[in-house]
Amino acid sequence: MQNPAIDAIYQFQQRLHSLLMKRALTQHVCRKVIPTFLDMLVELKQSAFKALASLGKTLGAWKDEVARMWRFSKSNGITEGFHRKMKLIQRRAYGFRNFENYRVRVKVLCG
């Protein structure tokens, strides 16, 4: 026998997941999706479960970024990865004597 509360939470999670997985939508489609997302945020914030209310608050704080995620397909993940690798190079080297040595090491490992 299934618990109706858990079933309702699962169904809500599936709807939210499918909504968040949409990518590179046109402006027209985004205008239709955003109100649905905002309605789901209100549902989450009014939930009796503290964890769901907290999730609603968190997603509400990131709603602009979520909307940008739907509209644009580009990400700066590659750049962030290179920055992380460059910081790792600096840490391992305990400081280079001149910038040219650091630049060469970055070009070899990241280029």
Image: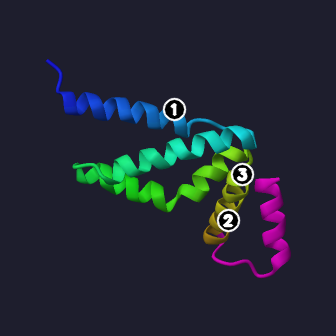
Name the element at disc 1.
helix
Q: Residues within 10 Å of mark 2 (few under 14, many from 20)?
A: some
Q: Estimate the x, y position of residue 25 in percent, counting from the top left.
A: 70, 38
The amino acid marked with disc number 3 is: Ile
Residue placed under numbered mark 3 in the picture: 78
Q: Is residue 85 above or below residue 102?
A: above
> Separation of disc 1 and disc 2 at Cα?
39 Å
Q: Estimate the x, y position of residue 54 in percent, counting from the top left.
A: 33, 56
Q: Residue at x 69, y 63 (%)?
A: 83
Residue span colored magenta: 93-111
Q: Residues within 10 Å of mark 3 (few under 14, many from 20)?
A: few
Q: Quadrant of residue 23?
A: top right
Q: Estimate the x, y position of residue 94 in percent, counting from the top left.
A: 63, 76
* Residue 109 belongs to magenta span: yes
Q: Residue at x 73, y 47 (%)?
A: 72
Q: Is residue 95 above or below residue 4?
A: below
Dot label at residue 99: none
Q: Is residue 50 above or below residue 106?
A: above
Residue placed under numbered mark 1 in the picture: 18
Dot label at residue 89: 2
Which circle, 1 or 2, is nearer the viewer?
1
Q: Are marks 3 and 2 in contact (CB under 8 Å)?
A: no
Residue projecting furthest to the bottom: 97
> Separation of disc 1 and disc 3 at Cα?
25 Å
Q: Estimate the x, y position of residue 2 in percent, counting from the top left.
A: 18, 21
Q: Relative to residue 63, is residue 93 drawn left or right?
A: right
Name the element at disc 3.
helix
User: Mark 1 or 3 closer to N-term?
Assistant: 1
Q: Relative to residue 57, is residue 38 drawn left or right?
A: right
User: Mark 1 or 2 closer to N-term?
Assistant: 1
The quarter of the rendered structure image containing the N terminus is top left
Answer yes or no: is residue 102 visible.
yes
